[in-house]
Image: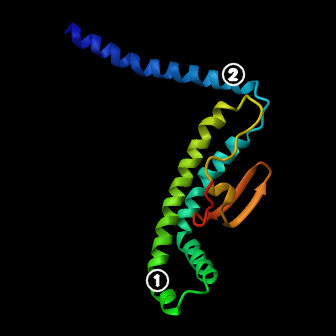
């Protein structure tokens, strides 16, 4: 009977300890952010990347069609039969590559989020960790202050660093 009571007290104490830990962590984050004088460029970039990465996946057929048309027009020396025969498998390949690129872009946003939170109180920022954000073509691209907006980012034809 005594063992059952001690287990009941431990399980009842765990949520209280979790709440106390959460409150302490919240106070520590607020205290750290209160003295921050740096811009939040990296956090803004991370959040826009996380928010807009699903558009890369949703618009994959449109982006793959545009990239296929660009690739076919950029290689005029290919015979017509090769262009006609290889266009459908190429479109499927580009479509899959675009979906995986959108997933990788969301991971890049997560990867940018951690240093952005750690560097919030320090001056300066770091370049984007995902190369497509710097070099890729998008269906819609605009710079709204420190936050670049790229909807339907193409993940093909990226230069190697």
Query: Considering only vertical position in the picture, is 84 above or below 21?
Result: below
User: Pointer 2: what residue?
Assistant: 31
Secondary structure state at the residue bearing disc 1: helix
Extreme residue in the front direction: 77
Extreme residue in the left direction: 1
Say the numbered circle drawn on residue 86: 1
Q: Nearer the viewer, mark 1 or mark 2?
A: 1
Query: Considering only vertical position in the picture, is 76 above or below 3?
Result: below
Query: Considering only vertical position in the picture, is 80 above or below 96?
Result: below
Q: In this orientation, which residue lies closer to the viewer: 151 or 16?
A: 151
- Looking at the image, residue 133 sits to the left or right of residue 144; the answer is left
Instruction: Determine crowd level at label 1: few under 14, some 14-19, many 20+ residues with C-alpha closer than 10 A.
Output: few
Say the numbered circle drawn on residue 95: none
Q: In this orientation, which residue lies closer to the viewer: 141 or 94?
A: 94
| Label 1 to label 2: alpha-carbon separation | 59 Å
Q: Earlier in the sequence, mark 1 or mark 2?
A: 2
What residue is drawn where x is 46% and y is 82%? 88
- In the rendered image, residue 101, in percent from the top left (x then y), is placed at 53, 59
- In the rendered image, residue 65, in percent from the top left (x then y), is placed at 56, 77
Instruction: Determine crowd level at label 2: few under 14, some 14-19, many 20+ residues with C-alpha closer than 10 A.
Output: few
């Amino acid at each position: 009977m005594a063992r059952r009571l001690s287990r009941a007290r431990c399980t009842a104490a765990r949520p209280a300890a979790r709440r106390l830990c959460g409150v302490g962590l919240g106070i520590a984050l607020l205290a750290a952010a209160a003295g921050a004088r740096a811009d939040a460029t990296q956090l803004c970039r991370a959040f826009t990347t996380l928010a807009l990465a699903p558009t890369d996946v949703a618009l994959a057929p449109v982006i793959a069609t545009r990239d296929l048309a660009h690739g076919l027009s950029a290689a005029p020396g290919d015979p017509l039969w090769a262009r006609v025969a290889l266009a459908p498998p190429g479109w499927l390949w580009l479509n899959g590559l675009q979906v995986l690129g959108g997933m990788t872009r969301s991971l890049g946003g997560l990867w940018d989020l951690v240093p952005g939170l750690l560097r919030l109180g320090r001056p300066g920022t770091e370049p984007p960790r995902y190369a497509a954000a710097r070099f890729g073509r998008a269906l819609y691209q605009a710079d709204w202050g420190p936050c670049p907006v790229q909807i339907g980012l193409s993940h093909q034809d990226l230069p190697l660093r």
